[in-house]
Image: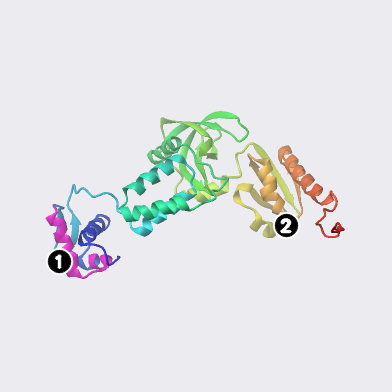
């Protein structure tokens, strides 16, 4: 801890330690505060004089703990914690996050609050253009239902704009690369589904309960199922063995399986253009798109654009072109 902290500040820090580590000994308090055991006991005395009920137990397993019903002071941030909070929120353009951060900064001590405000006002960030902030009310309803193990009815709008309603078991809400997903079991399809939370318009909790799979790893299951259940079917055949192609395939692209000395990638997507440009265009293997028609059209469009880029004739600055004579 900083050596310039006042006895009052150290006493409050002692109170925070006891809140998180009930039963801490004088030796443990001293180590956490960076003081002697005698000084640690003095801060315990300051708390008791201020009316804070601190209980102590003697013996080899004894220590200090806060009494029942103790009202703790507002959350106290260190300088590193406060500045870290501002840095974490810098790349978030959500208005609610900005308002909440402003309240936190105003509640900080003057010197620390001034540092945090300066960082917020004078630092710039380039937010992830692909991240989408879902409705907090919708997200909260999904998390609440997931914790209570209750099924919900959700109104969903697909990438293509199609709207539908479905009853699902909300296993977990997962944040992945700036996007929020609901990992669930669809009652209608009787299968695992991954829904973008920002495309869920309404959530209605039902009386039906559910039990998630034993040992569920939400992140792993999400990764495995991101390439299934979307509007447009995909099937791509690579002229290379599975062992070579596998390191280039991300889970949302679908399931990769061996087929002789080649391999086949099957799945689905809600954005054929992104599938073609972001994923297939970077694959260093010869491949053939066998389905579906939307992905074939997207790949053809990318191929035509790339072909036009190299067949449009040399530009003045291109290798092999003849520069204009200087006046």
Let me know if residue 47 is in the magenta part.
Answer: yes
N-term-proximal mark, 2 vs 1: 1
Instruction: Where is residue 27? Give x, y as percent.
Output: 22, 68
- Which residue is painted at 38% across and 55% down in the image? 115
Query: On the image, which quarter does residue 295 sit in?
Result: top right
Left or right, 36 with reference to 105: left
User: Can you say whether 293 is above or below 7 in the image?
Assistant: above
Q: Mark 1 points at which residue?
A: 59
Q: How far apart are marks 2 and 1 (CA)?
A: 69 Å
Horizontal relation, residue 161 to residue 136: left or right: right
Which disc, if any, is residue 284? 2
Report the predominant secondary structure element of the magenta stretch: helix
Q: Residue at x 77, y 43 (%)?
A: 300
Is residue 54 visible in the rendered image? The answer is yes
Mark 1, Cα crowd under 10 Å, few <14 / some 14-19 / many 20+, is few
Which contiguous range is marked in magenta?
Answer: 29-50
Image vertical order of residue 123 relative to residue 32, above or below: above
* Residue 184 percent across, percent down from the top left: 50, 40
């Amino acid at each position: 801890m900083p050596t310039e902290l006042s006895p009052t500040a150290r006493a409050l820090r002692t109170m925070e330690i006891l809140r998180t580590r009930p039963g801490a000994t004088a030796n443990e308090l001293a180590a956490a505060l960076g003081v002697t055991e005698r000084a640690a006991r003095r801060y315990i005395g300051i708390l008791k004089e201020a009316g804070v009920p601190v209980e102590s137990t003697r013996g080899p397993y004894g220590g200090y703990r806060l009494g029942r019903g103790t009202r703790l002071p507002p959350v106290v941030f260190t300088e590193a914690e406060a500045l870290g909070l501002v840095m974490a929120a810098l790349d978030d353009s959500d208005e609610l996050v900005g308002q909440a951060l402003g309240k936190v900064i105003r509640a900080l001590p003057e010197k620390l609050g001034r540092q945090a405000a300066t960082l917020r006002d004078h630092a710039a960030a380039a937010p992830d253009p692909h991240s989408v902030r879902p409705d907090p009310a919708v997200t909260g309803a999904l998390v609440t239902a997931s914790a209570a193990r209750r099924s919900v009815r959700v109104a969903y709008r697909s990438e293509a704009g199609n709207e539908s309603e479905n009853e699902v078991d909300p296993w977990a809400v997962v944040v992945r690369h700036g996007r929020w997903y609901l990992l669930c079991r669809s009652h209608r399809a009787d299968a695992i589904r991954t829904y973008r939370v920002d495309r869920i318009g309404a959530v209605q909790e039902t009386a039906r309960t559910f039990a998630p799979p034993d040992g569920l790893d939400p992140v792993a299951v999400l990764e495995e199922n991101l390439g299934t259940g979307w509007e447009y079917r995909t099937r791509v055949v690579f002229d290379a063995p599975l062992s070579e192609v596998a390191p280039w395939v991300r889970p949302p692209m679908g399931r990769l399986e061996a087929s002789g000395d080649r391999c086949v990638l099957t799945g689905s997507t809600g954005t054929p253009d992104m599938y073609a440009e972001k994923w297939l265009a970077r694959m260093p293997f010869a491949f053939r798109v066998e389905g579906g028609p939307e992905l074939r059209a997207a790949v053809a469009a990318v191929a035509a654009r790339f072909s036009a880029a190299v067949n449009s004739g040399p530009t003045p600055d291109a290798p092999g072109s003849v520069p204009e004579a200087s006046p």
